[in-house]
Image (cartoon, helix red, strand yellow):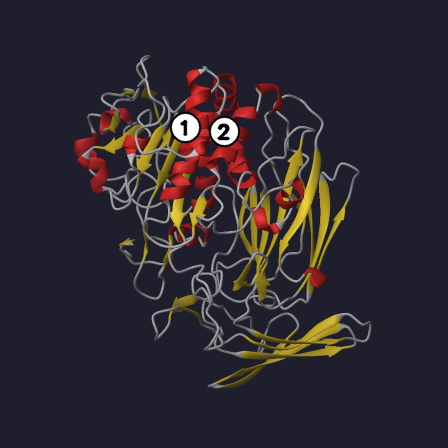
Amino acid sequence: MHSIKFFGGLRRVLSIALITAAPAAMAQSQDSPQPVEVNGGSAYVAPIHLPPPPLSERPVVQINFPDAAPTAVLGPETPLPGHQLLRELYARGEAAGNWGDLYENRDRKHSPLNMARHPQLTTLLYHPILRDQNIDYGPALGLLFNAPVIGNSSTALTAGPFARSLPRMVLTGMQAGGAQALYQNYVNGQIHVYPSYQDHEPGGKDMFPANTPYYIISQGASGSDQPHLEALAMILAAFRPDTKAKLIETGLLASTVQMVFRRSRDQVGERGAYLAAVAHPTVFPPEGINLERMVALANSIKPENIPPMVHLTVLEEPEATPGIDMFGDGLTERLFDTPSAIARVWRSPRFSREMVVSARDTVDPNGLPLTFNWVFLRGDDDQVDIELLDEAGSSARISMGWQEANVIAGSPDVVSTRVDIAVIANNGVYDSAPAFISMQFADHEIRYYEPGPDGAMQITRLTRAPHPDVPFDPVLFPRTDWIDEYTYEGTELTGWERLTDYGNQTFNAQGETAGAMPKYPVVEGVDGLPTVAQQTQ
């Protein structure tokens, strides 16, 4: 794996989202940027193609393609049945091909797609000024394009206490606005493949804090992205010309590609399997990629039957109170909210919680009536209940109880401390790509619950200091080196006793000790990890 350097500062890893440097060199940019002209199979992006800095939002780069496309949809050494099917469909004018699609390598040719196999793809290249700012490197959070994009980056944070894959880096907030940028990619028809690096190893733990449909994570390290890139290129080429045009127009290209990719894998033979965990893992192995099925399914979709993209909204959920339920300035239980992925981190000591989530904002592009499936994917099913609130299943009440690590369905050699629920819409012809609701638990903590007088579970002791044998993410869970023992009068919390290496303190139910409310800044600990400090006024 190529390594992304850690520039210091927990919330600032890569300065790639917006172009802010080299103002003198960028001065040649115009208020109306010039389009990029495709030449010789490449699109060369330079400062003149971007608005002048400072940028207030992600720029959309305009790409102009010549009318004449390369004759062959596939190059040599493509002998599989899926390749042959695509050639036949393209020869009959029934498949769009890849002319008008972009390929972006974001690891500087460390793991490049073999472009000879896909001669109609156009390669994105970057001017040295943009390369100097890493616009071409790492996670794709910077530029948007007016054309479909597939890409990859076999890079990761490979050293230090914050080592992790690119998706985990983005989802945990180390790149500001990262989850929203991923969603922007999704509705703009951009899908990238990122290796899981060491975040999903056999015999280990799934370290990702959420599942999303915004990219594909390949199982492994450098080079593991290649089979998935090939599948993406084939799917884009296999769509009917009129279907592909409508997918681009409606912002549904990436979501439909995700559906085809997941629905066509060998492990997903029947629709029932698509409505199950096997179709929607966090990380995809190369085994099971079936190019022939992918080409056939993509080509079968007509413009009038395009599946929708699920749009989720949280209507009700509990709020954790800083200084009582959780500790650490700036921390919340909301990791991110995006239309097709919602993620939470269970920080509070409560044993159970409820969320009401709606998919009513989901709209079929052809006005077809929709029904919804809410699919429990992972976690302890005895501690999760999904109650549909209307006949179509457009909203649901989700009840969860605290739970420990569980084996992942379909990946018995990997454990997870996450609950995942997929929401899938059906328009009577096709199922949609999944939207996800994820809840991350802190299994490195030790919690004791006992039934209260009313039978409801009450927290009695919570050891927040991390267990030495349990891996945890220091970005999501800053070290908190104390133990809290809780006291009650009946069902009412009266306070807690805090046990530390420096003595004990008594807190009331309002989080006060010695008549004052402490502050809990997150500082750099002696081990270099973020640590919650207690400062009593």
Asked if one can make out residue 189 in the rendered structure from this viewpoint, the answer is: no
Image location of residue 254, percent across then percent down: 49, 33
Q: Position of residue 176 (x, y in %)?
A: 41, 48
Residue 258 in view: yes
Which numbered marker is on residue 442?
A: none
Which residue sits at x=62%, y=40%? 312
Q: Camera-side residue: 79 or 285? A: 79
Question: How many angstroms separate mark 2 from mark 1 (CA)?
Answer: 8 Å
Residue 330, horizontal then vertical, whole percent: 48, 58
Q: Name the residue that disc number 1 marks.
A: 148
Give the mark, 2 or 1, whose residue is nearer the N terminus.
Answer: 1
Question: Residue 453 or 53: which is nearer the viewer?
Answer: 453
- Hey, what amino acid is under mark 1? Pro
Count of numbered badges drawn on the protein: 2
Residue at the disc numbered 2: 253
Under circle 1, the secondary element is loop
Amino acid type at circle 2 is Leu
Foreground residue among 141 and 80: 80
- In this view, the residue farthest toward the top is 67
Left or right side of 523 for 123: left
Q: Tell me the residue at 65%/36% (across/down).
A: 425
Q: Are marks 2 and 1 in contact (CB under 8 Å)?
A: yes
Q: Nearer the viewer, residue 383 or 531?
A: 383
Quadrant where the N terminus lies?
bottom left
434 shown above or below 472: above
Rate crowding at label 1 as few (under 14), some (14 to 19) or many (20 or more) other CA atoms within 10 Å. Answer: many
